[in-house]
Image: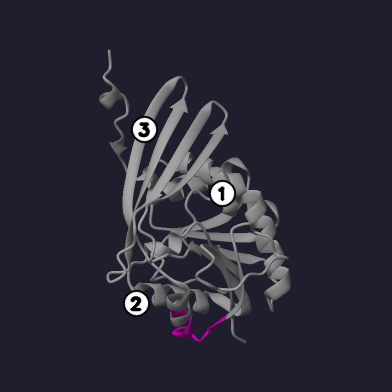
Amino acid sequence: MTSPTAATRFETLDWYETPKYYDIVFDVDTSKEADFLAAIYERYAGTRGKRVLEPACGSGRLLVELARRGWSVTGDDRSQPMLAYARERLDSAGLVGTLRRNDMADFHTRGRFDLAHCFVSTFKYLLTEKAARAHLECIARALKPGGVYALGFHLTDYAATGRTRERWVAQRGDTRVVCNIQGWPADRRRRLEQVRARLVIDEGGVRKRSETTWNFRTYDASQVRRLLRSVPALEHVATYDFRYDADECCRLSDAQYDTLLILRRRE
């Protein structure tokens, strides 16, 4: 008989090496996110092209959805397994897209884009102010004048002393994934917070468990504003939250945990 301790053991694994399960978890909001991107593009962009860039495109779920809607899509990522899975998704759907292995803080593009986007706090993997600023400068160079960038991430409550928790349950075919993400109180001086994602996967009658830990860079509203001021080529034109409702603008403030910035390349 398997002991309870052994039964609940999690294998240490970078979840970017298992793109299928990552894709299943985050695919839930894909259609809503794509609707939102189309709406904010119509509302805020000063261009009328259909070229879209996704730095840190992950499993390619939004690339596929936007390509289906007629966008010319380009996705960057550092993870080769993620890029391979994104290519498989595009090919299996009969869609065309450009995929490149690139660093978020150091990339160049051929031509310029009308729209760019980066959701699910991926931006916070950039652990220094220099890297965060370099990323925004890369985005500014990649956008056409008037092009827009949708950047979504969680703000940090530096006064919080407890852990934060989020849970998703998603299923595709015979594969069910439960994802629990836990965050520890932030280190304000170092501007780091530890995060852990645990996946429980039931697939084909077999249960697997894995966990990934990493650090995020932390931001409160004033730190976001300071960073944006350091990249004058981008203009902050609106703030939303993770409900992805283009008709409900918010204020950039510490009262709002889920923050989605709309930045526009100055003319």
**Relative to 105, residue 141 above or below:** below
Residue 54 seen anywhere in this rendered image of the structure: no
Residue 73 spot, x, y in % from top left = 59, 59
Please provide percent x and percent y for residue 193: 33, 60
Residue kind at label 1, given as amino acid type? Arg
Q: Position of residue 64 (x, y in %)?
A: 60, 50
Q: Nearer the viewer, mark 3 or mark 2?
A: 3
> What's under tag 3, amino acid-wise?
Arg
Left or right, 238 with respect to 157, comes to: right
Which of 28 and 219 lies nearest the eye of the viewer?
Answer: 219
Give the amino acid at mark 2.
Answer: Lys
Query: Where does label 2 land, which residue?
Result: 130
Q: Residues within 10 Å of mark 2 (few under 14, many from 20)?
A: few
Please identify the quadrant where the C terminus is shown.
bottom right
Give the residue drawn at x 47%, y 83%.
231
Residue under label 1: 61
In reply to whether residue 231 is colored magenta, the answer given is: yes
Residue 209: assigned label: 3
Relative to residue 213, is residue 222 drawn left or right? Answer: right
SS of the residue under disc 2? helix
Bounds of the magenta span? 227-235
